[in-house]
Image: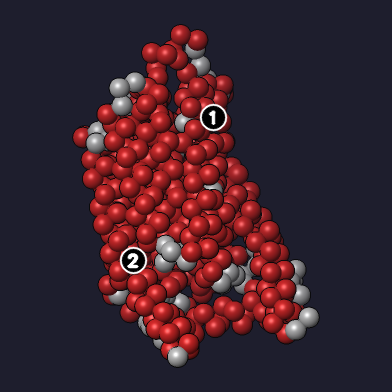
Amino acid sequence: MDATGDESAIGRRTLAKVAWRLVPFLSLLYVFNIIDRSNVGFARLKMTEDLSLSNAVIDLGYGLFYVGYLLFEVPSNLLLRRFGARAWIARIMVTWGFVSMLTAFVTGPWSYYGARVLLGVAEAGFFPGIIYYLTAWFPAAKRARVVAGFMLAIPISNILGNPISGAIMDGFQGTGGLAGWQWLFILEGIPAILLGFSVLWYLPDGPRDAAWLAAEERDWLDREIVGEVGTRTSVGGHDKLWALADPRVWLLIALYFSVAVGTNVTGSYLPKLIKDSFEPLLADSGGINWKVGLLSTLPSILSVIAMVVVSRISDRSRSRSTLIAGALTGAAVGWYFAWQGGDPWTKLAGLCVAQAGMMAVLPVFWALPPLFLGGVAAAAGIALINSVANIGGIIAPSLVGRFGIGPLVAVMLWGVAMALLAWRTLEWPALRARKTLEHNSRG
């Protein structure tokens, strides 16, 4: 076998080994991250009665999570780079697990608001930290597929978490003198703490710390990643302040804002939307919460399929923004039918399509920032995109609580426009340069 063949074989073996070692574990961590931030969407079904809270209070508290998230996201990601992924991710998980459990003991609006802000502070840096961490392990050509594997945690957390949440609320009601929603926060906070400690011995800080890779595999991976960072340096450098001011970062924030609004609506309102539609059909036989949980898995099941298919197409075609535009167009159609559907099943079908469209965007979107960001700039830029765009999470629940889900159609179409602008700004210049290079080489 020639040198090129040897290199290719080493690359395939290395990336397969890294993917199987890291992605399932990181995805498991993210499952509980999603469950612990969004389980208030289920808890609201009884919290409003037990604590005499209005849905507007629950909505505001759901959004206040992102206040702490916004303020501490960029510093947290820079600290991850300084202290290492292993220690910092473990710290984040243990902290959010304890805060999530303490949410069980809120007594009114202000303690609930405080718990949500603290949860945002505790979780800040986890998601962008993982995205940044993955850029140290996988070349750009594989990144959308890898991020898709990691982000399958979102629909999986709903597939598993929603029925379990409903069952906890129905089955633990009154146990030990606590309400079912209190047990929900307690029992779903414990795994985050346990997994946080497991990070300390399982997760390496980077490829050079991976004892399970052979020396030649570590060398190959180091050459690939360093070579890509060198390319990005030529179009932007590694300065974190430069990253925060780059107009391309803010374009991606504007694009991701639409997804943040939509996904936070499903996180905070999906159980209620389904319960409101199906309650006349489900109430006869009792135990309605776990049935709502089962129905709410359907959008997530379709999302798994959409994320896998679209991410594979994206990596194969190296087309990102146009696929995002198509997925958000589908999401807009889904929200329209969820809004205007004449019967519960049509509305549920609309929710399924909307959720699948929005989820398909996520792994493809996070392949865009590394096109022009590297090093410290990547850590700062990715965190900034995630934190500022998630202002959408602050306004989304209150938007729906006041106006219903109709405005989400317009929000998705805004995302379509931003995706097309991202293609013109980020991908078209690279495509044009590649075609020019190919033409010159033929000449």
Q: Pick out the residue farthest to the top.
A: 284
Q: Pick out the residue farthest to the left.
A: 403
Lower position in the chain sequence, tag 2 or tag 1: 1
| Secondary structure type for disc 1 | helix
* Residue 352 on image: x %, y %: 43, 36
Residue 246 or residue 432, whichever sits in front:
432
Tell me if residue 214 comes above or below residue 265 in the rendering. below
Task: Using the rendered view, name the quadrant where residue 25 is placed.
Answer: bottom right
* Residue 254 on image: x %, y %: 28, 60
* Colour convention of the picture: secondary structure
Return the mark for residue 163. 1
Packing grade of label 1 (10 A; few <14, some 14-19, many >=20) is many
Residue 26 or residue 141, whichever sits in front:
141
Q: In the displayed structure, does residue 203 sit left or right of residue 212? A: left
Is residue 393 shown to the viewer in this render? no
| Secondary structure type for disc 2 | helix
Packing grade of label 2 (10 A; few <14, some 14-19, many >=20) is many
Return the mark for residue 423. 2
